[in-house]
Image: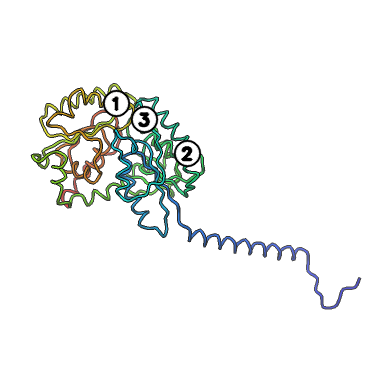
């Protein structure tokens, strides 16, 4: 068959090349459209808080996300001791800050011993998948070194949800250290507080490009706390009208889960010393770790709740608590607040036991001059 004049024949290789070019251009157009959609879509961020302490660190981040509604969709999940009356029902302070709590998960198995902690992790792992599947967040923000946080990180990692871990890379005593490092290894992104913590994360083979040296989130509130003129009103509301600035003690001691009996003994000795000091003392109930019930029994056996020099409380709003720490004559116990928040104000601290062994400390009284 003769070829018609004027009709050009093309090499089959050239036709294949042109066809592949068209496919490539079509894919690139689709990718561009997808990127444009992604750039317009809000990032859904789930913040999970387990107790009064981690909320003080997460709150500044939550406010930041809430103030950028065009970029972020904030989902709040509350679990752990937030929902227990014996620990102050602290979920209410989240509601008072005008955050919508999307999910409340009762995950604490009462008993406050080692087995109850394990059962609480298991209960959280049973309940979390349904919540995370429903919310389907782009990223989960989790803080610190609590057993509740370990359950959150485990569930999210197994469900291929990206995790941002706050305050990883730090070193302290007891089981908290192991839990913190385990969460760091499950996490995909890190916001750490100190340069040494950053180096620890790198030593754990975490990607340096995914680590942000951001400082402690609660310092946002510490920076403005010195300028408050109503601090004496706050102090008197908790400790009475006769108390004076720098003339009272703040006590906060938690159980050490790797040596419960020894930590209870130290707690009893601390209470005996505080009674002998004959000073107004604000004492906070211990957290929900194994051994806390025994500590409360020791407190009640010594009559602390009825003692005229003591004010025993389950919870204090963070903004007021840091005022009380800032203007105290001394802080005593084993809380990380004694290392971080109290250190920022230059408040003298007596640290008891091994719970903060290895934690970075320093002289940080520069805020006094502001």
Q: Residue at x 15, y 50 (%)?
A: 230
In x, y percent, where is residue 11?
78, 66
How many angstroms separate mark 3 from mark 1 (CA)? 19 Å
Question: Which labelled disc corresponds to residue 175?
Answer: 3
Q: Earlier in the sequence, mark 3 or mark 1?
A: 3
Q: Residue at x 62, y 61 (%)?
A: 27
How many angstroms separate mark 2 from mark 3 (CA)? 20 Å
Question: Which labelled disc corresponds to residue 155?
Answer: 2
How many angstroms separate mark 1 from mark 2 (CA)? 29 Å
Question: Which labelled disc corresponds to residue 293?
Answer: 1
* Picture layout, residue 186 above or below residue 225: above
Please identify, in this view, whether the residue under mark 2 or under mark 3 is nearer the observer.
Answer: 2
Q: Looking at the rendering, in which quadrant would you find the N terminus? A: bottom right
Residue extending farthest left: 242
Residue extending farthest bottom: 6
In x, y percent, where is residue 331?
19, 36
Q: Nearer the viewer, residue 292 or 276?
A: 292
* Picture layout, residue 92 above or below residue 172: below
Crowd around label 2: few <14 · some 14–19 · many ≥20 (10 Å): many
């Amino acid at each position: 068959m003769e070829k018609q004049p004027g009709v050009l024949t093309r090499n089959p290789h050239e036709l294949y090349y042109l066809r592949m070019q068209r496919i490539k251009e079509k894919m690139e157009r689709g990718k561009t459209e997808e990127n444009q959609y992604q750039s317009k879509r809000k990032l859904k961020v789930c913040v999970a808080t387990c107790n009064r302490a981690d909320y003080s660190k997460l709150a500044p981040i939550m406010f930041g996300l809430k103030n950028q509604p065009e970029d972020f969709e904030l989902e709040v999940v509350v679990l752990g001791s937030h929902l227990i009356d014996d620990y102050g029902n602290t979920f209410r302070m989240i509601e008072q800050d005008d955050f919508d709590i999307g999910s409340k998960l009762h995950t604490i198995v009462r008993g406050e011993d080692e087995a109850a902690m394990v059962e609480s992790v298991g209960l959280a792992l049973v309940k979390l998948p349904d919540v995370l599947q429903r919310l389907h967040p782009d990223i989960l923000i989790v803080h610190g070194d609590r057993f509740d946080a370990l359950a959150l990180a485990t569930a999210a990692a197994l469900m291929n949800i990206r995790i941002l871990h706050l305050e990883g890379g730090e070193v302290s005593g007891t089981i908290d250290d192991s839990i913190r490092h385990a969460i760091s290894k499950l996490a995909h992104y890190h916001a750490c507080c100190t340069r040494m913590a950053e180096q620890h994360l790198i030593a754990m083979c975490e990607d340096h490009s995914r680590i942000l040296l951001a400082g402690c989130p609660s310092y946002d509130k510490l920076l403005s706390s010195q300028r408050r003129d109503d601090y004496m009103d706050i102090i008197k509301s908790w400790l009475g009208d006769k108390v004076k600035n720098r003339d009272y003690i703040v006590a906060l001691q938690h159980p050490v889960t790797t040596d419960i009996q020894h930590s209870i003994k130290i707690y009893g000795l601390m209470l005996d010393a505080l009674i002998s000091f004959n000073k107004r003392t604000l004492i906070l109930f211990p957290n929900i770790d194994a051994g806390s019930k025994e500590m409360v029994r020791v407190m009640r056996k010594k009559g602390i709740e009825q003692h005229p020099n003591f004010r025993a409380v389950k919870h204090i709003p963070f903004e007021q608590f840091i005022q009380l720490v800032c203007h105290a004559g001394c802080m005593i116990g084993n809380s990380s607040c004694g290392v971080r928040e109290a250190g920022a104000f230059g408040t003298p601290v007596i640290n008891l036991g091994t719970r903060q062994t290895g934690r970075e400390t320093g002289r940080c009284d520069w805020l006094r001059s502001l």
